[in-house]
Image (cartoon, rainbow, N blue to C red):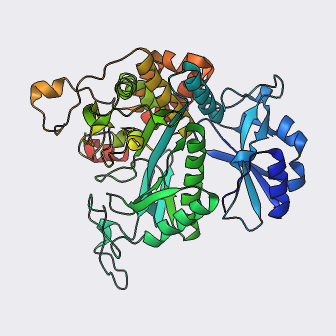
Amino acid sequence: MPLACQTPEDLFKLIRDQKVQIVDLRFTDLPGTWQHFSVPPDAIDDNALAEGIGFDGSSIRGFQKIQESDMVLIPDPTSAFLDPFTEATTLVLICNVRDPVTGQRYTRDPRYVAEKAEVYLKSTAIGDISYFGPEAEFFIFNDIRYGQGINHAFYYIDSDEGSWNTGRDEHPNLGHKPRAKEGYFPVPPVDTLQDMRSEMILKLMEIGIRIEAHHHEVATAGQNEIDMRFDSLTRMADKLMIYKYVVKNVAHGRGMTATFMPKPLFGDNASGMHVHQSIWRGEQNLFYSEGNYAGLSELGRMYIAGILAHAPALLALCAPTTNSYRRLVPGYEAPINLVYSQRNRSAACRIPMYSTSPKAKRVEVRFPDPSCNGYLAFAAMLMAGLDGIQRRMNPGEAIDKDLYDLAPEEAKAVKSTPGSLAEVLNALEADHDFLLKGDVFTRDVVETWLAYKREKEVDPVAIRPHPYEFHLYYDA
């Protein structure tokens, strides 16, 4: 049931009326994972909403050092929803993080970064509100095993839908397994996950999230997509966290496992997160202009130019894992080309043409993936687009040709996305001034992100032997 909760009084009434037994306080760490702890309902009072509830920030990834660990959470009453998975009646509150010493909002809190981006947009007088609509894809597997040690490294994935299981003895094997790159959109029995996705969207709608569609995706072995209706930047990032939570818990409840890892399967399509975005002033969509290419306004073109100009740096926040660069390669519908087009799906930016309505005009940025922290990724893309508008950047001519079949001289002029997390982190280090405007991202946030990603992800992957290297080099 959607909860229309706006004020502290609304929240206290809600707790009474719904006979809430537990209040779960949630916030997002710097990499983008939900963290939580729970309190009894009587812990939520005027003091808790004003002064906050304490926790240890030194144990949270990307947050505090041990000598400055004390932090507080300030619950946001407008974020309240009833958890559909808990036995006890549990009210979830998404929280903002505050430093108890300074009394100020915590600059490394991703939600604060998103909120500051929205404030900055208004301060520019370019527009009043930015809308975001992510299409987060994911896989659902029947089994996942992985391990890493001094003398071994392996992963093993299995799926009843996997094309590799057509010959498995299943007592009986009934076939109907989608072939690689042919999972879009066969009906059941090939699509075995219809009921599970329906359960997911019913849970999401119960919470109050509007859903537009759900379907099987291109890859074999259970790739899926659920599309949420667009919303304002911070609220959409909140909904993305809820979306991931619901998807994982519905799958887990059915004895399966869901992952938003971009590229878990070799040789088939990966999971992206195309992000639709637009800027409005009042009831006017500023990205629409009749008679222009694809109905896109000059402001929309400059927004795209900012996205394309800063794309290598944006990728450090929008496709932020080493695995992301297993996806961003030619041949798997990957949007590796830093151009824009009204229909071409291998372009980094696309202008969807499904509707002629001015309200539907938007830019679809296609290189993000669902491993990202939505608060940071959405904020960064808005800041890049605004930089393009402020500097009146020109994105050049749109390209509507097959980008994989261009003449050599044309292909040379098309820039591509970088090929590794290390490269995009270097790009962010060199190009992040646009993020610092309005104090939206601070230097500390950027530096902490770079240090964390290099130390915890880039270096550990780089120094380990890859299993395929034994196939290539053992007889050397």
- Residue 179, how many percent across, how many down? 26, 64
Residue 453 picture location, percent across and down: 52, 31
Q: Establish if 11 lies above or below 405.
A: below
Residue 163 position within the rendered picture, expressed as x and y whole percent measured from the top left: 30, 66
Q: Which residue is drawn at 13% across and 26% down?
A: 410
Q: In this view, does 251 lie above or below 35?
A: below
Residue sitting at x 58%, y 48%: 239
Q: In front: 153, or 133? A: 133
Q: Residue at x 46, y 38 (%)?
A: 321
Q: In which quarter of the image is the C terminus?
A: top left
| Residue pictured at 54% horizontal, 40% vertical | 374
Q: Can residue 52 be seen in this view?
A: no
- Asked whether residue 286 appears in the rendered view, the answer is yes
Residue most extreme to the bottom: 171
Q: Which of 255 and 184 is in front in this view?
A: 184
Residue 120 sits in quarter: top right
Query: On the image, which quarter does residue 186 sit in?
Result: bottom left
Residues 458 and 218: in front is 218
Q: In which quarter of the image is residue 106?
A: top right
Does 80 appear above or below 297? below
- Is 332 situated left or right of 370 in this image? left
Please state the horizontal and vertical placement of residue 187, each as a whole percent of the image.
33, 72
Numbered disc total: 0
User: Considering the image in quadrants, where does the N terminus appear?
Assistant: bottom right
